[in-house]
Amino acid sequence: MATTEELAEFVTDVSYREFSETTCEELKKRVLDSVGIGINALGHDPVDTVHQTVQHANPGDNCTLWGRNETASPVGAAMHNTALTRYLDFMDSFLAPGETPHPSDNIGAVIATAESVDASGMELLEGVGVAYEVQGELAWNAPVRDNGWDHVTHTVISATCGVAKLLDLDVETTRDAIGIAGTAHNALRVTRTGGINEWKGIASANAARNAVYAALLAKDGMEGPKNLFEGQKGWKQVISGEFDVELDPGCTRVHDVMTKRYVAETYAQSAVEGIIELAEQEDIDGSDVEAVHLDTFAGAKLIIGGGEGDRHEVETKAQADHSLPYMLAAALLDRKMGNAQYDPERIGRDDVQRLLRRVTVEEDEEFTERFEAGEMPARVTIELEEGTTHVVEKDAFEGHPTNSMDWAQIEEKFHKTAGMQFDDERRQSIIDVVANLESHGVDELVGCLE
């Protein structure tokens, strides 16, 4: 039986010395990927709204607001920088049968806290490792989506654990922090159902903010429920049901995390890759398409295929990046799926609005079984008006844990994302620091992000 004490003991037991070389590299990849995506998100309206609020509500000189040449409190920096890494929907994902959270949602809180205590690069990696391990174990063993809770209900706990590690809290104080965070900050699934709005891309930033605040309260002496999970009317009884975890001090869950190749919801990655390959291979003109049909697994059908609200009514980015009909239509027409495909002008154009209404999505029970066994299957069928049919089937995509991106590919993605804001020299400085975090302090990393 998983207990709050077990989680707290795990946090205090984790040591960089127990990390394998490959685990260290995976953690560094997560940091570099998240920072690049975050820098790419600067200037988007919802992120700017968060920035404005942080300026007013969480001023301070402790922590860097990435790309702003400004500072805020650890709480404010966690909120702002997590909003950056999450907003574009280009972040990483952990693929569990019943839950697909984004462990990179922890990065902003962990880095902000690390900066506030002048942590070393090795200490930063410990905090990131803790957060990824807890996030993965909760997603795998205690999914909450079907009970009506959003996955950031996990994130507030995992981020608190990572932050507690950086604050060097003892077991009892870490229990307090986890208890405060997990009692007070459980998020409803309504965020991602029906008519989706911009809160979808900001909810995890709110969780990150709450995680840092909970840990700081505990650090300053606030007692929290020490039996969050196992207590009467606790997390298990109310939110998740009974579960157990197998937390590895080597923090190996990071190896099960995928990297997105396309700016699209996690479950769309294989289908988007497949339809782009098919459009290029067969030189398909979108205006000649009569119908597009996707066979997919249950989670994709539920979340982005129409199971939690009509996904054919698309007017905004928040709706578009959670609509399989839109993503497949835009990918077929443009043969790419990046930020430009979510511009309001692109979303409203007649060609994509026409084509997305010709896209159907259906669950294939075999594909659901294959997804639960570790694949991300998709079969795309395109029927042309003159009767020709083209089909492509994918087991996974570039960036899936079975076909993970190596360091060079992560670097390439980083140059494309951060390159929208930072020049070559600055990007190379960030790469050099992250690649050699063992030899650098967190101050050197955030110094590159001002």
Image: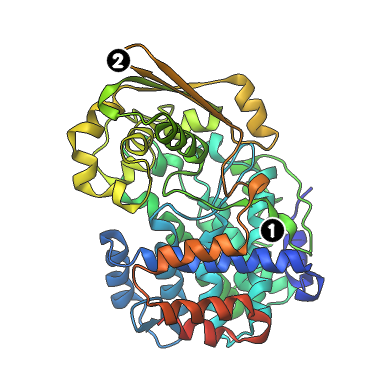
Q: Looking at the figure, which quarter contains the C terminus?
A: bottom left
Query: Viewed as shown, does residue 292 lie left or right of 33?
Result: left
Identity of the residue furthest to the right in this view = 18
At 59% from the left edge and 38% from the top edge, which residue is drawn?
A: 396
Please state the horizontal and vertical placement of residue 306, each as a whole percent of the image: 40, 27
Q: Is residue 125 above or below residue 260?
A: below
Where disc 1 sits, the SS reads helix
Quarter-of-image position of residue 162: bottom right
Name the one closer to the observer, 19 or 349: 349
Name the residue furthest top: 387
Instruction: Please tell me whether mark 2 sits on a helix, a strand or a loop.
Output: loop
Q: Which residue is drawn at 63% across and 59% down?
A: 406
Image label count = 2
Q: Work out whether 77 lies above or below 347.
A: below
| Residue pictured at 55% horizontal, 53% vertical | 259
What amino acid is at disc 2? Glu
User: How would you rate the neighbour count of disc 2 (Cα within 10 Å): few for under 14, some for 14-19, many for 20 or more?
Assistant: few
| Residue 209 at least partly seen | no
Number of the label disc, if any, that sits on residue 385: 2
Q: Is residue 403 left or right of residue 285?
A: right
User: Up-down: is 255 above or below 79?
Assistant: above
Left or right for 278, reference 403: left
Q: Earlier in the sequence, mark 1 or mark 2?
A: 1
Q: Crowding near pointer 1: few (<14 within 10 Å), some, many (20+)?
A: many
Identity, as a three-letter code, of the amino acid under mark 1: Glu
Residue 133 badge: 1
Q: Position of residue 27 (x, y in %)?
A: 64, 66
| Residue shown at 59% from the left, 43% from the top | 239
**Residue 204 falls left or right of residue 58:** right
Q: Quadrant of residue 290?
A: top left
In front: 276, or 126?
A: 276
Image spot of residue 83 (x, y percent): 40, 63
